[in-house]
Image: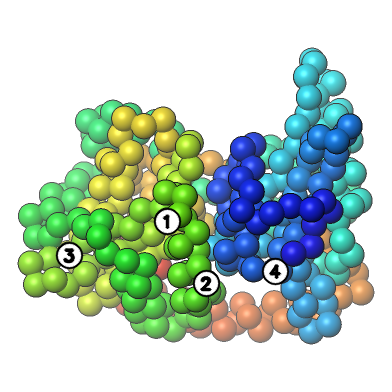
């Protein structure tokens, strides 16, 4: 584990924006491969950016590991008036960038709380805006129910009469459903079962995950999802609906149950996406608010042709697989099977 200061992978970082930035999370999804760049003032950390170093075709890429939506960065701008805090933020971000290990390409999704990426722009990075969808206040289930689109309410009612949402299923249940969805759409899975089990153990030890599955009277699992949470937010991480049973409305039922279970807590609910049109419709149908975040990147000029060629091939493969998936309109590996149409 490459870091600027000696740390333990079990350390919790109380000021991290999301659980994805925690050291224990990074060690679970990228054991021995992750690092963090730190900026300190008078022995106190004032900025941090986590990363994973990959070697591809002789190119060093600083990126983020599987199942890790955001990587930070975290900056403490200090006190004072806005102009002073912003100047401090610019200064420590510039130092953070300068201290990054050598790389040929950088790829990282910044947490939605990070609204200033100007120092990265000045250092030659680029950014595109992406969106997640969030319910900011889940304290009132009646208000949330009213906020659902009518077809989602119908799906929840119908599925609720046919099946129960269980909390006693393990991560293997989620993985089985998830793999069925990817196989049906001809897509590669970005993480293996070993990684998922390692992350499941790390989250379970900290009470930071919930697994919900919609199961009918014949013990058939219609949909299963893996959720993670910290004190402020519940995140929908991975899962899906069985492609053979996707018309049952189980995806909607599981999502609603996850949201309803958070009622009375200070948490918000984050669907972790999506830029994919059917999934976006599904998330929006729950009354979720569109929240932008920055995907920041930089590619050194000498490796741009190599990475562009590789990216072009990857896009062709994904486009072909996506076309196959759209023909069937399956319940996808992110929500969208039930209420997305």
Identify whether 263 is placed above or below 18: above
- Marks 1 and 3, how far apart at CA: 22 Å
Percent x, y of residue 17 = 61, 41
Q: Which residue is mark 4?
A: 32
First in sequence, mark 4 or 1: give its number.
4
Q: Secondary structure at mark 4?
A: loop
Crowding near pointer 2: few (<14 within 10 Å), some, many (20+)?
Answer: some
Q: Residue at x 13, y 53 (%)?
A: 160
Name the front one of labels 3 and 2: 2
Name the front one of labels 3 and 4: 4
Residue 54 falls left or right of residue 290: right
First in sequence, mark 2 or 1: give its number.
2
Q: Which residue is mark 3?
A: 215
Q: Which mark is residue 195?
A: 2
Q: Residue at x 40, y 68 (%)?
A: 333
Residue 238 falls left or right of residue 129: left
């Amino acid at each position: 584990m490459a870091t600027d200061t000696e740390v333990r992978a079990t350390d919790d970082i109380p000021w991290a924006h999301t659980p994805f930035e925690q050291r224990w999370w990074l060690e679970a999804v990228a054991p021995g491969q992750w690092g963090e760049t730190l900026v300190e003032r008078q022995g106190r950390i004032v900025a941090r950016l986590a990363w994973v170093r990959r070697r591809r075709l002789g190119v060093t890429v600083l990126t983020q590991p599987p199942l890790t939506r955001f990587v930070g960065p975290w900056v403490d701008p200090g006190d004072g008036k806005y102009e002073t805090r912003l100047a401090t933020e610019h200064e420590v971000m510039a130092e953070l960038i300068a201290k990054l290990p050598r790389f040929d390409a950088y790829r990282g999704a910044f947490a939605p709380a990070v609204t200033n990426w100007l120092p990265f722009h000045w250092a030659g990075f680029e950014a595109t805006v992406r969106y997640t969808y969030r319910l900011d206040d889940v304290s009132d289930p009646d208000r949330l129910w009213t906020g659902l689109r009518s077809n989602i309410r119908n799906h929840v009612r119908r599925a609720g009469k046919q099946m129960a949402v269980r909390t006693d299923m393990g991560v293997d249940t989620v993985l089985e459903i998830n793999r069925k969805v990817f196989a049906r759409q001809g897509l590669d899975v970005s993480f293996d079962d070993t990684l998922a089990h390692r992350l499941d153990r790390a989250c379970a030890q900290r009470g930071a995950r919930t697994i919900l599955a919609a199961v009918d009277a014949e013990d058939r699992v219609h949909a299963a999802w893996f959720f993670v949470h910290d004190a402020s937010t519940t995140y929908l991480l991975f899962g899906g609906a069985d492609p053979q049973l996707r018309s049952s409305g189980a995806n909607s039922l599981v999502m609603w149950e996850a949201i309803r279970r958070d009622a009375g807590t200070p948490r918000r609910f984050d669907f972790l996406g999506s830029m994919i049109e059917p999934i976006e419709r599904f998330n929006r149908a729950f009354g979720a608010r569109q929240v932008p975040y920055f995907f920041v990147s930089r590619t050194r000029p000498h490796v741009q042709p190599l990475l562009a060629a590789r990216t072009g091939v990857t896009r062709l493969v994904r486009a072909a697989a996506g076309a196959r998936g759209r023909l069937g309109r399956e319940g996808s590996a992110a929500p969208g099977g039930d209420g997305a149409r």
